[in-house]
Every structure is written in C-alpha cells, then in structure tokens.
Amino acid sequence: MFEIRVICDPGDADRISQTLTSAFRTGTPRTCPTRDGMRTRLYVTADHHPDTAAEGTTQ
C-alpha cells in the first residue's frame, strides 16, 4: 500500500481521483488547500489491483 499526493487545480481533483481509482484500488480521497490557497492537495491511499491473469497459472 502507498500514498499518492497530487497538487492540482481544484476543478481537476474529481477527474484525477476517478483516474487513480481506475488504475489502483484506492481509499477515500482526502483534499486540502495548498498554502497559497490557489490549488488543492489531493491525497489517495492506493494499492495495486490483484493480477488476475496470474491467478489461473500454476508453476
């Protein structure tokens, strides 16, 4: 598990959250303004999707 931090325009936060959710298993995104108040800090706890292709193979 790891955390992703993105600094972006407030209007892009939802789109970025959705994109990260499609790429990883994620928790609930957390947002807070940057110090200058002009942008948003987006924090997402993420984990890789399970590799379903490898589940059916045997070694």
Image: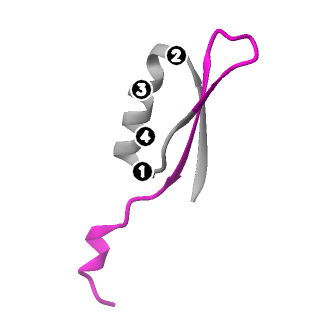
Q: Which residue is mark 2?
A: 10
Q: Nearer the viewer, mark 1 or mark 3?
A: 3
Q: Is residue 34 magenta?
A: yes
Mark 1 vs 3: CB contact within 8 A: no
Task: Describe residue 15's horizontal placement relative to residue 32 as left or right.
Answer: left
Residue 7 lies in quadrant: top right
Residue 48 lies in quadrant: bottom left
Local secondary structure at mark 2? helix
Q: Amino acid at mark 4?
A: Leu
Q: Name the N-terminal-most of marks 3 and 4.
A: 3
> Residue 4 in the image: x percent, y percent?
58, 42
Q: Which residue is mark 1?
A: 24
Q: Is residue 43 magenta?
A: yes
Mark 2 vs 1: CB contact within 8 A: no
Kindly report the distance in space between the C-alpha atoms of the residues bearing marks 1 and 4: 6 Å
Mark 1 vs 4: CB contact within 8 A: yes
Local secondary structure at mark 4? helix
Residue at x-position 33% and y-position 90%: 59
Local secondary structure at mark 1? loop
Q: Which mark is residue 20?
A: 4
Local secondary structure at mark 3? helix
Q: Which residue is mark 3?
A: 14
Mark 3 vs 4: CB contact within 8 A: no
Kindly report the distance in space between the C-alpha atoms of the residues bearing marks 2 and 4: 16 Å
Q: Which residues are magenta?
A: 31-59
Q: Amino acid at mark 2?
A: Pro
Residue at x-position 54% and y-position 14%: 9
Q: Name the N-terminal-most of marks 2 and 1.
A: 2
Closer to the camera in the image, 59 or 47: 47
> Residue 56 in the image: x percent, y percent?
23, 80
